[in-house]
Image (tube, rainbow, N blue to C red):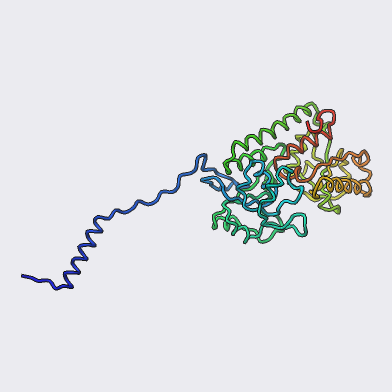
Amino acid sequence: MFTFSRPMTLGLALLAFAVTAACGQTTAPAAKPAAPAAGFPIQVPDCEGRTTTFDRPATKIVTSNATSLEILFWLGAQDLVVGTGFPPAKGDLPDRFADAAAKVAPLGGDATGGAMRGISREQLLGSGADTYIEAWGALAGMADVATPEQLAQVGIKRVLLHSTACAGLLSKPLTDLSSVRADVTRLGALTGRAAQAAQVVSQMDATLAKVGRAVAGVPEGDRPSVFFFDYDAGTDAPTVPCNRQIANAVYTLAGARNAFADCADDFKKIGWEDVVKRDPDWIQIGIRNHGGAEADEKAFAEAERFLSTFAATRDLRAVKNRKFIRVRSEVTTTGGVRNADAVEKIASVVYPGRVPAGQ
């Protein structure tokens, strides 16, 4: 008869327990990836056609500047915004959005005070955002820009506003606001505000349709040419919007012609002699925001005085006949909801008998 020593007995008992436990243990199944939210996934293309997949709505958004911020406000998505670059100054946005804008954390410098600066790489990567909406793409001269790869590493997905950021890559002239509609619709889908986006687009289309009906009878050859004068960019050498720029679409829809519509780009620096050669019918005084209606009117008048006294421009037809259009730069050269209002305003100035102001 064999007898077991106490240590061997204890070891066999522990071994038997381990085997029994292992045999009775059930392995938990691997966790399945979360199913996409209703209406998702959404594929969002960049300017070159590369896509980013969203499986669910954006919940924490950072915007590059007031352009993309304003679209979110039109959609009623201000509660999703956790910060913005180039924080809007007084007058940048419609008054109805002033309270919402004041609550957005500034992640960049004030665009009207001192040097303009956007969001630094560190600020953006550490913002806690899940979505970054960029209006212009990587602006020339801006350093310290976070790359799409760096954004992806911290879980931030990048969305571009095609109407503005992709303009220079278009293969043909921009003559309508379809890219703006697409931007609004896309952001509506990404924020769970598709119904609001549809309503905003419908209102834009209604404004454009009224203007379109009013100017439809004007022959192409009779449509007046418009020179966009970016007074705040300096007066040494003008920079004009070309036919890939949203301003070209604004003028076309207003029943006018971009004086530099033969330029296949978004913007181009020219000489004053080029303006003299074209001798435009109208000049848009495209000032930027000066902080309020009174300050804006002062800047408009200052720009008109320059044109009336500058040797190269004082004899232009538009200057002699006081054919000036006072519409700010932002609503003409940057894609957004108020492009439709700019179309209506410009048309009402150029065709006062056809398109009443504020129709």
x and y percentages locating residue 311 in the rendered image: 94, 49
The quarter of the image holding the C terminus is top right
x and y percentages locating residue 88 in the rendered image: 72, 51
Residue at horizontal 16%, vertical 69%? 9
Q: Is residue 346 left or right of residue 45?
A: right
Residue at horizontal 77%, vertical 34%? 344
Q: Is residue 338 left or right of residue 8?
A: right
x and y percentages locating residue 233 in the rendered image: 81, 52
Q: Is residue 330 left or right of residue 169?
A: right
Q: How many marks?
A: 0
Q: Identify which residue, 147 or 304, lies in the foreground.
A: 304
The quarter of the image holding the N terminus is bottom left
Q: Is residue 56 left or right of residue 11?
A: right
Q: Identify which residue, 218 or 294, lies in the foreground.
A: 294
Figure check: 119 above or below 221: below
x and y percentages locating residue 35 in the rendered image: 45, 44
Residue at horizontal 40%, vertical 51%? 31
